Amino acid sequence: MRISKRTVASKKLRDGMVLAEPIYDIDGKMLFSEGLRLNAKRIERILRLELMSVMVEESVYDEPIVNDDMVFETHSVKSIIEEKQAIRKQQLLNETRNEAAVMVEDLFTHVLEDGSVKTEKIKRIVERLIEAILYDDQVVLNLSNLSTIDDYLLSHSVNVCIFSLVVGIYLGFSQPRLMKLGTGALIHDIGKILVSQNILTKPGPLTDDEFEEIKQHTIYGHKILRDTLKYGDESAAIPLYHHERIDGLGYPEQKKGHEIPLFAKIVCVADVFDAMTTDKVYSDKVTYYQAINYLIKQVNTQFDEDIVKKFITIIGFYPIGLPVKLSTGDIGQVISTNKKKPVVKVLLDANGNRLNNYYEIDLYKNPSISVIDVDVQKPA
Ligand SMILES: [Fe+2]
């Protein structure tokens, strides 16, 4: 038996569990050390920190238990290992994503009252998101995992940061440029803390005055990045210009095409894509296909052509996690792509019945089968 680590949602912590990693506060001060055994009092203190999850120790048996009638096939063992590795990568990313959301929430709550906000924490989070993307961008872009954070503004901030960084990486940006892009993208909407909550969450149409107030979040955000957090022009321009449009019909300064800084144009595409594909109080989400088609239709009016092309190349027409219906009638989910064709894990038959034996099919190797519909109801 050996000791391994696993993530546990804070709400599911129990007496006797042992911390596998230390817990730090927002300033990087250690609050709980690694190896600490939890009791009711400690769990209560951890819950007060409002962490989404923590790492605890877990006993793992190394020796496989083999029955006489058990047959191992090299292929299936390999795919089980690969699947477990993929799950672990996804867990690591979700932890980073959740930590980023907690950090953004803390920043949004305290940035105005606390002049000594630590930009060091933002730097660490952006660095970790870059690392996670470089480690496996397919895992990062798994669309079925983008909604792991409940609060819209927080999950939107983290998703926009990830989408923007992926575009930046594919554009060949250096690490310092990625840091500037990721920082501005993560807090591009921070100016909304100065806009009335009633307006931000109003379900119906906005009056002209209310829309004018919403527009101010770009200017407020710019001031916070420049004056409070002391970021340079490249990062600070992101909140200011992320609602500008190529045709000059955006806000706040009606800048056109080349007048809009590149970082703001990248964040603009990421912002619109994530906003369209997420449910909000004032609008229902659209499908990934509809969002991608919208981006294409608005090239050179709203969005920069090169950035949209790059974005779609990266996201792909068959993003991981996309539910699809095949020409056989079967329904499944995209798990990877092979030469731009999807590899689908089939979960339901043509009648909607769950299959006892799931199977994977590579449509590049099976050209007679095609995808006939996408964004179909996701198999539960
Ligand atoms: Fe915005």
Image: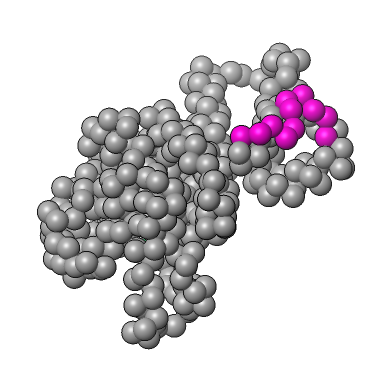
Up/down of 219 relative to 304, above or below = below
For this rendering, which residue is in front, 198 or 144? 198
| Residue 278 on image: x %, y % | 44, 61
For residue 167, what is the image quadrant?
top left
Q: Residue at x 28, y 47 (%)?
A: 233
Up/down of 123 relative to 306, above or below = above
Up/down of 11 relative to 205, above or below = above
Tell me: 214 left or right of 19.
Answer: left
For this rendering, which residue is in front, 278 or 202? 202
Q: Residue at x 34, y 40 (%)?
A: 180
Tell me: 46 left or right of 262.
Answer: right
Q: Residue at x 23, y 59 (%)?
A: 295
| Residue 345 on image: x %, y % | 45, 41
Tell me: 178 left or right of 28.
Answer: left
The magenta stretch is 28-38
Tell me: 220 left or right of 79.
Answer: left
For residue 51, what is the image quadrant?
top right
| Predominant secondary structure, magenta span | loop
For residue 33, what is the image quadrant?
top right
| Residue 177 on image: x %, y % | 29, 36
Q: How is the image coloured?
A: one colour
Q: How many marks?
A: 0
For this rendering, which residue is in front, 209 or 375? 209
Confirm whether residue 215 shows in the render: yes
Instruction: Quarter of the image for the N terminus: give it.
Output: top right
Confirm whether residue 67 shows in the render: no
| Residue 21 on image: x %, y % | 68, 28
Instruction: Quarter of the image for the C terminus: give it.
Output: bottom right
Q: Residue at x 42, y 30 (%)?
A: 131
Q: Is residue 135 magenta?
A: no
